[in-house]
Amino acid sequence: MTDDSGAESAMRREHDASWSANLEGPEHAMDRDLIVEQSKDAIAQTAAGYHVNLVTHGDHGHPETYLWDELEAAFDDVRLEYVDRCGCGGHVTRVHVGGD
């Protein structure tokens, strides 16, 4: 799946297990809105009772400052948890989806 930016979506199918979405590409460094959009896509494709690790580009700083409010406003039954900063400079947010 692609969007108007030409960036491939983090989503390809529904995930009925925990998984990670890589949102660290050069297209993500240039477009914070793309990270938000693809994070929402990733959560929507994660089955209840599982989690998705959103690995976001480090150029935008800590995801709590720009991503978490957007996700909490879009979804009723998620729990956000900051995991750690990656060795490459990105950040990992674990999003638990319903029933977890």
Image (cartoon, rainbow, N blue to C red):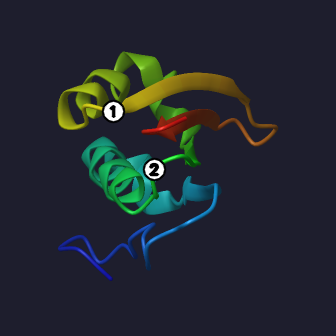
- Observer able to see residue 61: no
Few, some or many residues within 10 Å of mark 2 (<14, 14–19, 20+): some
- Most extreme residue toward the bottom is 1
User: In x, y percent, where is residue 13?
Assistant: 43, 78
Q: Could you tell me which secondary element the residue under label 1 belongs to?
A: loop
Q: Nearer the viewer, residue 44 or 61?
A: 44
The residue type indicated by label 1 comes to Asp
Q: 34 or 49, which is in the foreground?
A: 49
**With 63 as the anchor, is 66 left or right in this view?**
left
Identify the residue at horizontal 41%, vertical 61% (top origin): 27
Residue found at the far top of this picture: 65
Name the residue located 63 percent from the left edge and 35 percent from the top edge: 92
Nearest the viewer among 33 and 43 is 43
Q: Residue at x 39, y 32 (%)?
A: 78
Q: Residues within 10 Å of mark 1 (few under 14, many from 20)?
A: few
Question: Which quadrant is home to the C terminus?
Answer: top right
Relative vertical location of residue 63 with respect to residue 34 in this rendering, above or below: above
Residue under circle 1?
77
Residue 48's label in the rendered image is: 2
